[in-house]
Amino acid sequence: MTELKNRGVRDIFIACVDGLKRFPEAIASVFPQTQVQLCVVHMVRHSLKFVSWKDCKAVAADLKAIYTAANSEVAERALAAFSKKWNGKYPTISESWHRNWQGVIPFLAYPDCIRKAIYTTNAIESIQRGFRKVTRNRGAFPNDDSIMKLLYLALRNMEKSGQNLFGIRKWPSTSSQSSSATVCRWRCEHHLNKRSLTQRFWQTLCAR
């Protein structure tokens, strides 16, 4: 995180993490205003590891009622209902959600269109898979620019193939909703309304 700051990152509005120990503390030490959101997809996957296949569908549906709640208060009631229903059989699930609750609920303060971008690490993991696909079979690169150009082309192909790189399809409506006081530090719309991801990547490359 210190390296990111040294490279010019002045602020992170919200950071979605996958449960790596001490990572939230590391973020807070460098960017104290950053909200840390635990990846809900990872939370659900971890929870379902404890569940027999017979109950998996029902447990998943009850967990969904928690993370799709209208706000944190409704989510807390859904978690209480989940605990009452399943604690006899799977007590470790509700214990895990209660233990990580402050990391689970930050995204519930935002509109649905923004939640899709910040509740999971899947979007960036998808981009990373695309990068690994085009680089793993290459033994060496002549210089740094050749790598940047290859990654640019990979991003362009992802966009052309219709891959939704951010989890948000309607940025204009998203940015208008994000102008409320609770999201006053949200800055993504400034970049994403104007240019595609590959255009920004290419501009960075040309500025080198």
Image (tube, rainbow, N blue to C red):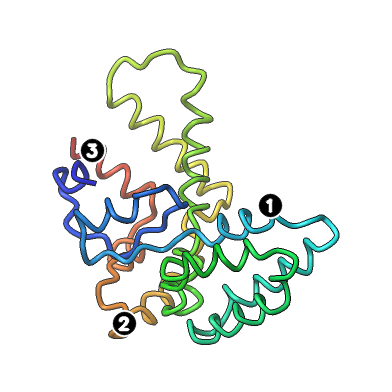
Separation (CA) of disc 2 from disc 3: 36 Å
Q: Toward the viewer: 158 or 166?
A: 166
Residue 7 versus residue 150 in the image, above or below: below
Label 2 with label 3: CB-CB less than 8 Å: no
Task: Looking at the image, tell me whether mark 2 or mark 1 is earlier in sequence order.
Answer: 1
Separation (CA) of disc 1 from disc 3: 46 Å
Q: How crowded is mark 2: few (under 14 residues within 10 Å), some or many (20 or more)?
A: few
Mark 2 against mark 1, which lies toward the viewer?
A: 1
Residue at screen point 53% across, 56% down: 164
Residue 153 in percent (x, y) is at: 43, 36
Residue 123 in percent (x, y) is at: 50, 52
Q: Toward the viewer: 134 or 67?
A: 67
From the image, tell me which residue sits under label 3. Answer: 206
Q: Residue furthest right?
A: 54
The picture quadrant where one finds residue 147 is top left
Residue at screen point 61% across, 54% down: 46
Disc 1 secondary structure class: loop
Task: Looking at the image, tell me whether mark 2 or mark 3 is earlier in sequence order.
Answer: 2
Q: What residue type is labelled 3?
A: Cys
Q: In this view, does 190 lie to the left or right of 54?
A: left
Residue 12 versus residue 179 in the image, above or below: above
The picture quadrant where one finds residue 89 is bottom right
From the image, tell me which residue sits under label 1. Answer: 49
Q: Which amino acid does label 1 sit on?
A: Lys
Disc 2 secondary structure class: helix
Q: In this view, does 91 lie to the left or right of 89?
A: left
Separation (CA) of disc 2 from disc 1: 35 Å
From the image, tell me which residue sits under label 2. Answer: 182
Residue at screen point 65% across, 72% down: 64
Residue 174 in percent (x, y) is at: 42, 75
Q: Toward the viewer: 132 or 31?
A: 31
